[in-house]
Image (spheres, rainbow, N blue to C red):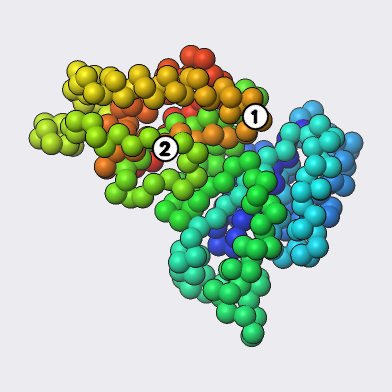
């Protein structure tokens, strides 16, 4: 059995996450009382007609505060039944959450005549702290549109052919901000930039002319060797510490040339010795 617990502040994309999981064969339950989590897991194990049941539940701040504070014990009780359980926590910055509520004109579940929207968002963060602290995977949706969030959930949660730690090597551009959910970040802006070559500017690190240009630069090769040596040594130790997800972010200025080229090479190198290595280019879309 596989159980996915989806949580996060209101407006961060929990409904979208449940829709994606439902479309991929999960039996989904929205706003489950946290205290019922062990019972749900037990019933799914005993009564399901599926050989490998897939269940996803959303637990949010509409729960009783006493149930949310007990979440660590409830999660431990579920995992004691040898159930594969992932906790997905979605979030966004406060400004983005305020904007989303204003655009949709929805009422925040914790707001009332005596509590403003901003205050409700902050209270919600405190209530969900026990879940956020135990999240296996955190996705910040501040800069993601609906389709990008769907793709991120499919890539990180559903595209795992092998058990164990899922590693994501991701390129990005600093001009759009550093990925807030990255565990390791490498800055490669010191390397020669193909952007300043007019014939290469409109291409990306996936294109052969850019790859050939970068492969011929000694600094690029030295950077690749240093990063790959570090990752090959230390990522297995991340896996040994029972980390479910690890994100390695490679950043250049725009996220189109140097970071993309190195991310592709690093992904190919890591895939030779590690399972569940995924590659993503955040800023190419």
Asked if 118 appears above or below 52 in the picture, the reply is: below
Please tell me how many numbered marks the rendered image carries: 2
Q: Which type of secondary structure does the marked residue at label 2 adopt?
A: strand
Of the numbered discs in the image, which one, if any, rests on residue 253? none
What residue appears at the point 70 percent right and 54 percent down from the top-left corner?
130
CA–CA distance in space, label 2 to label 1: 20 Å
Q: CB under 8 Å between callouts 2 and 1?
A: no
Q: Nearer the viewer, residue 66 or 211?
A: 66
Q: Which type of secondary structure does the marked residue at label 1 adopt?
A: loop
Work out which quarter of the rendered image holds the N terminus and state it: top right
Asked if 136 appears above or below 109 in the picture, the reply is: above
Q: Position of residue 19 (x, y in %)?
A: 61, 49
What residue appears at the point 10 percent right and 35 percent down from the top-left corner?
198
Q: Position of residue 17 (x, y in %)?
A: 59, 49
Q: Position of residue 98 (x, y in %)?
A: 49, 69
Asked if 10 appears above or below 133 in the picture, the reply is: below
Q: Position of residue 231 (x, y in %)?
A: 46, 24
Residue labelled with disc 1: 241
Residue labelled with disc 2: 185
Work out which quarter of the rendered image holds the C terminus and state it: top left
Q: Which residue is most to the left?
A: 198
Asked if 9 appears above or below 146 in the picture, the reply is: below
Can you see residue 152?
yes
Q: Nearer the viewer, residue 219 or 156?
A: 219
* Quadrant in the picture for residue 200: top left
């Amino acid at each position: 059995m596989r159980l996915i617990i989806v949580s996060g502040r209101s407006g961060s994309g929990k409904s979208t996450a449940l829709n994606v999981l439902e479309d991929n064969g999960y039996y989904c339950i929205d706003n489950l009382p946290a205290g019922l989590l062990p019972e749900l897991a037990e019933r799914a194990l005993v009564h399901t007609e599926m050989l490998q049941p897939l269940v996803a539940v959303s637990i949010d701040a509409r729960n009783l505060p006493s149930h949310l504070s007990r979440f660590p014990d409830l999660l431990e009780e579920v995992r004691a039944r040898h159930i594969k359980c992932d906790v997905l926590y979605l979030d966004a910055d406060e400004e983005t959450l305020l904007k989303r509520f204003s655009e949709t004109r929805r009422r925040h579940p914790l707001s009332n005549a005596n509590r403003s929207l901003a205050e409700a968002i902050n209270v919600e963060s405190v209530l969900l702290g026990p879940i956020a602290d135990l999240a296996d995977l955190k996705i910040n949706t501040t800069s993601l549109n609906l389709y990008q969030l769907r793709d991120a959930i499919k890539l990180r949660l559903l595209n795992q052919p092998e058990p164990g730690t899922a590693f994501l090597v991701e390129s990005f551009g600093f001009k759009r901000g550093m990925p807030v959910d990255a565990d390791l970040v490498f800055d490669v802006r010191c390397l020669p930039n193909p952007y300043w070559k007019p014939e290469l500017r409109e291409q990306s690190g996936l294109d052969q002319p850019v790859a050939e240009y970068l492969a011929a630069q000694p600094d690029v090769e030295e950077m690749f060797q240093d990063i790959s040596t570090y990752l090959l040594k230390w990522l297995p130790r991340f896996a040994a510490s029972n980390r479910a997800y690890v994100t390695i972010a490679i950043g250049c200025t725009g996220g189109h040339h140097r970071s993309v080229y190195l991310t592709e090479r690093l992904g190919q190198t890591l895939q030779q010795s590690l399972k569940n290595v995924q590659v993503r280019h955040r800023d190419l879309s």
